[in-house]
Image: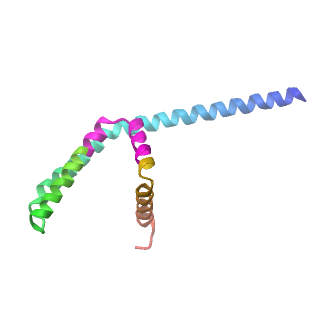
Amino acid sequence: MAIKSTTFGDAADTTVSKVTDKVTETAAQVKDKVDANRNAAAQGIEQAASTIRDKAGSLPGGETVTDLAHTAADKLTATAGYVRDTDVNTMMSDVERLVKNNPGPALMAAAVVGFLVGRAFSGND
């Protein structure tokens, strides 16, 4: 009997090892794809910032709204630089630190994002 349990244990260890290797390989592929698309995402964010800057003067609300639009465009430009210059692992570490330091707002933001995603996929429009 001991031989059978050892054989079963070896088979289970081999299966776990194969699954772990596959998960690690898949995670590396996803990371590589995200890293490869960072530049395109940063360009899209910069394009949005440029559009906001171009349209800021024509927005109703006067100088206050124009200033807010320019501030938003500046934040988008900074975000584009962050996305372009920061790898996925560092981004994940930054998100973890942000959530740990601000659990209430992070939970609220997650709830809002969840609500918006739910609305986007619901057929009740």
- The location of residue 69, given as percent across then percent down, is 17, 58
Q: Which secondary structure dominates the residues rendered in magenta? A: helix
Outermost residue toward the right? 1
Tell me if residue 57 comes above or below residue 40 in the rendering. below
What residue occupies the far top of the structure in this picture?
A: 3
Q: Residue 97, position in %: x, y?
A: 42, 43
Q: Which residue corresponds to the image point at 29% horizontal and 40% vertical from the top-left?
A: 82
Coloration of the structure image: rainbow
* Quarter-of-image position of residue 91: top left
**Image-based side of 57 in relation to 40, left or right:** left
Q: Is residue 99 left or right of residue 7?
A: left
Q: Is residue 96 magenta?
A: yes
Give the camera-side residue of 67 and 57. 67
Res. 108 image quadrant: bottom left
Vertical placement of residue 7 versus 117, above or below: above
Please give the name of the residue rendered at 86% of the width and 26% of the height, measured from the top-left corner: 3
Report the front residue among 61 and 102. 102
Q: In the picture, which quadrant includes the C terminus?
A: bottom left
Residue 12 location, quadrant: top right
* Residue 10 percent coordinates (x, y): 75, 28
Q: What number of labels is visible?
A: 0
- Span highlighted in magenta in the image: 79-98
Image quarter where the N terminus lies is: top right
The residue drawn where x is 77% and y is 31% is 9
| Residue 75 point in image, percent of width and height | 23, 49
Left-right relation of 95 to 23: left
Whether residue 34 sits left or right of residue 82 in the image: it is: right
